[in-house]
C-alpha cells in the first residue's frame, strides 16, 4: 500500500504561512522553513508591542504636556498636581491633544489651575 502524505493539507498550511510572510525580504518571504521562523518571531513581536504601544503613547503624551507646560512657565509635575487639587478630570491623552492643537485652551487651563 502506498504511503499517504496528505499533500493537500501540507500545501494549504505552507500557503497560509507564506501569505503571512508576504513582504519579508529575501528568503524570509519565499522559503517555507525560514518564513516559518520569521513569522513566529514576528508574532512574538506583535504580542509584545501591543502592550508596549500603550506605554509609548503615554510617554509621548507626557512629553507633549511637559513642553506646553514649560511654555506657560510651570513644570509638568506641578501642573499635574494642580489638576488633581482642583479636581480636573482630564486624562493625559486629552491634555496632550489640547497642548498640541489648541494652545490657547491649554493656556487657559494652566491659568485656571494655577490661580
Image (spheres, rainbow, N blue to C red):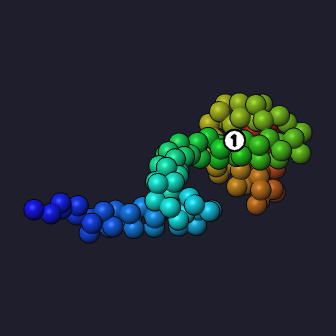
- Tell me what residue is drawn at x 18 percent, y 60 percent: 3
The answer to whether residue 50 shows anywhere in this view is no
Residue sitting farthest toward the front:
1
Which part of the image, by quadrant, shows the N terminus? bottom left
- Tell me what residue is drawn at x 47 percent, y 54 percent: 33
Which part of the image, by quadrant, shows the C terminus? top right
Which of the pair 102/61 is nearer the observer? 61
77 in relation to 88, above or below: above
* Secondary structure beneath label 1: helix
The answer to whether residue 27 shows anywhere in this view is yes
Residue named by callout 1 = 59
What x and y, as percent, mark residue 95?
69, 48
What x and y, as percent, mark residue 20?
47, 63
Answer with the quarter of the image where residue 27 lies: bottom right
Which of the pair 91/105 is nearer the observer? 91
- Tell me what residue is drawn at x 70 percent, y 46 percent: 61
Badge 1 crowding class, 10 Å Cα cut-off, few under 14, some 14 to 19, many 20 or more, is few
What x and y, as percent, mark residue 72?
87, 44
Residue sitting farthest toward the left:
1
What x and y, as percent, mark residue 104?
81, 57
Q: In the figure, is residue 86 to the left or right of 115?
A: left
88 in relation to 106, above or below: above
- Tell me what residue is drawn at x 77 percent, y 47 percent: 64
Answer with the quarter of the image where residue 65 lies: top right
Amino acid at each position: 500500500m502506498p504511503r499517504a502524505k496528505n499533500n493537500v493539507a501540507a500545501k494549504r498550511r505552507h500557503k497560509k504561512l507564506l501569505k503571512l510572510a508576504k513582504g519579508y525580504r529575501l528568503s524570509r518571504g519565499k522559503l517555507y522553513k525560514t518564513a516559518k521562523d520569521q513569522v513566529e518571531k514576528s508574532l512574538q513581536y506583535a504580542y509584545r508591542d501591543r502592550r508596549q504601544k500603550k506605554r509609548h503613547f503615554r510617554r509621548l503624551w507626557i512629553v507633549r504636556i511637559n513642553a506646553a507646560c514649560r511654555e506657560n512657565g510651570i513644570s509638568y509635575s506641578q501642573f499635574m498636581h494642580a489638576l488633581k487639587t482642583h479636581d480636573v478630570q482630564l486624562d493625559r491623552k486629552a491634555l496632550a491633544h489640547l497642548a498640541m492643537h489648541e494652545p490657547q485652551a491649554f493656556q487657559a487651563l494652566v491659568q485656571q489651575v494655577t490661580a
